[in-house]
Amino acid sequence: MVNVQSEVRKIPLISMGIVIPILSGIIFCSLGFWWIYKLDVLPGLHADEAWSGLKAVQFQNEGVSQIIGMNNYTGILQTLLTGLSFDLFGRGVFQLRLGGVH
Protein backbone atom coordinates (compact mmCIF):
# COMPACT_ATOMS: atom_id res chain seq x y z
CA MET A 1 0.00 0.00 0.00
CA VAL A 2 1.31 3.46 -0.95
CA ASN A 3 1.46 6.11 1.72
CA VAL A 4 -0.18 9.16 0.08
CA GLN A 5 1.09 11.57 2.70
CA SER A 6 4.74 10.69 2.08
CA GLU A 7 4.25 11.02 -1.69
CA VAL A 8 2.84 14.54 -1.31
CA ARG A 9 5.87 15.66 0.66
CA LYS A 10 8.21 14.60 -2.13
CA ILE A 11 6.59 16.95 -4.68
CA PRO A 12 8.82 20.03 -4.99
CA LEU A 13 7.01 23.24 -4.13
CA ILE A 14 7.91 26.70 -5.38
CA SER A 15 10.26 28.22 -2.88
CA MET A 16 8.93 31.26 -1.03
CA GLY A 17 12.39 32.72 -1.48
CA ILE A 18 11.54 33.14 -5.17
CA VAL A 19 7.85 33.98 -4.92
CA ILE A 20 8.13 36.84 -2.43
CA PRO A 21 10.68 38.89 -4.46
CA ILE A 22 8.69 38.34 -7.66
CA LEU A 23 5.42 39.41 -6.03
CA SER A 24 7.15 42.37 -4.38
CA GLY A 25 8.54 43.43 -7.75
CA ILE A 26 5.13 43.17 -9.41
CA ILE A 27 3.50 45.19 -6.63
CA PHE A 28 6.28 47.80 -6.71
CA CYS A 29 6.02 48.21 -10.50
CA SER A 30 2.23 48.40 -10.33
CA LEU A 31 2.32 51.07 -7.62
CA GLY A 32 4.99 52.97 -9.54
CA PHE A 33 2.85 52.90 -12.68
CA TRP A 34 -0.25 54.19 -10.92
CA TRP A 35 1.84 56.80 -9.10
CA ILE A 36 2.83 58.50 -12.37
CA TYR A 37 -0.16 57.57 -14.58
CA LYS A 38 -1.48 60.77 -16.17
CA LEU A 39 0.35 62.77 -13.53
CA ASP A 40 0.29 65.86 -15.72
CA VAL A 41 -3.47 65.66 -16.36
CA LEU A 42 -5.28 64.44 -13.25
CA PRO A 43 -6.87 65.98 -11.17
CA GLY A 44 -5.96 69.47 -12.35
CA LEU A 45 -3.42 71.97 -11.06
CA HIS A 46 -4.17 73.34 -7.60
CA ALA A 47 -3.01 76.60 -6.05
CA ASP A 48 -0.59 74.91 -3.63
CA GLU A 49 1.07 73.02 -6.49
CA ALA A 50 1.31 76.16 -8.59
CA TRP A 51 2.85 78.08 -5.68
CA SER A 52 5.43 75.33 -5.19
CA GLY A 53 6.35 75.44 -8.88
CA LEU A 54 6.61 79.21 -8.97
CA LYS A 55 8.72 79.23 -5.82
CA ALA A 56 10.97 76.50 -7.28
CA VAL A 57 11.57 78.65 -10.37
CA GLN A 58 12.28 81.66 -8.14
CA PHE A 59 14.78 79.58 -6.12
CA GLN A 60 16.46 78.50 -9.36
CA ASN A 61 16.76 82.06 -10.61
CA GLU A 62 17.55 83.93 -7.38
CA GLY A 63 18.64 81.27 -4.90
CA VAL A 64 16.90 80.13 -1.73
CA SER A 65 15.59 83.20 0.06
CA GLN A 66 13.53 81.62 2.83
CA ILE A 67 13.30 78.40 4.79
CA ILE A 68 9.55 78.42 5.29
CA GLY A 69 6.97 77.39 2.74
CA MET A 70 3.64 78.94 1.92
CA ASN A 71 2.87 79.30 5.65
CA ASN A 72 5.03 79.71 8.73
CA TYR A 73 4.39 76.07 9.68
CA THR A 74 5.44 74.49 6.36
CA GLY A 75 8.89 73.84 4.99
CA ILE A 76 10.46 74.08 1.55
CA LEU A 77 11.29 70.41 0.94
CA GLN A 78 8.62 69.99 -1.73
CA THR A 79 9.75 73.20 -3.41
CA LEU A 80 13.37 72.03 -3.43
CA LEU A 81 12.35 68.63 -4.85
CA THR A 82 10.31 70.41 -7.51
CA GLY A 83 13.34 72.54 -8.40
CA LEU A 84 15.47 69.39 -8.68
CA SER A 85 12.83 67.82 -10.91
CA PHE A 86 12.80 70.95 -13.09
CA ASP A 87 16.60 70.79 -13.35
CA LEU A 88 16.61 67.13 -14.36
CA PHE A 89 13.56 66.92 -16.63
CA GLY A 90 12.62 70.48 -17.62
CA ARG A 91 9.64 72.52 -16.51
CA GLY A 92 6.13 71.15 -16.77
CA VAL A 93 3.16 69.91 -14.78
CA PHE A 94 4.45 66.31 -14.74
CA GLN A 95 7.81 67.45 -13.38
CA LEU A 96 6.06 69.73 -10.88
CA ARG A 97 4.14 66.83 -9.41
CA LEU A 98 7.02 64.34 -9.23
CA GLY A 99 8.34 65.77 -5.98
CA GLY A 100 4.98 66.24 -4.33
CA VAL A 101 3.07 63.04 -5.00
CA HIS A 102 2.30 61.08 -1.85
Image: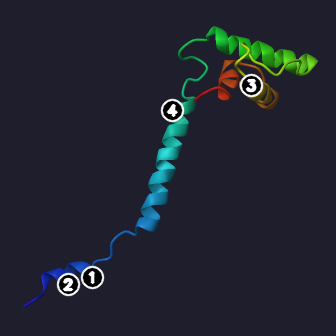
Q: Are marks 1 and 2 in contact (CB under 8 Å)?
A: yes
Kind of element beneath mark 2: helix
Q: Which residue appears at 14% of the width and 81% of the height?
A: 4
| Residue that label 2 marks | 6
Label 4: few (<14), some (14–19) or many (≥20) C-alpha neighbours in 10 Å: few
Amino acid type of disc 1?
A: Lys
Q: Classify residue 75 by image quadrant.
A: top right
The CA span between labels 4 and 3 is 20 Å
Q: Residue furthest bottom?
A: 1
Q: Classify residue 42 by image quadrant.
A: top right
Q: Nearer the viewer, residue 5 or 80?
A: 80
The CA span between labels 3 and 1 is 56 Å
The CA span between labels 2 and 4 is 46 Å
Q: Earlier in the sequence, mark 4 or mark 3?
A: 4
Q: Are marks 1 and 4 in contact (CB under 8 Å)?
A: no
Kind of element beneath mark 4: helix
Q: Earlier in the sequence, mark 1 or mark 4?
A: 1
Q: Earlier in the sequence, mark 2 or mark 4?
A: 2
Q: In the displayed structure, does residue 47 sit left or right of residue 72?
A: left
| Residue that label 1 marks | 10
| Residue that label 4 marks | 34
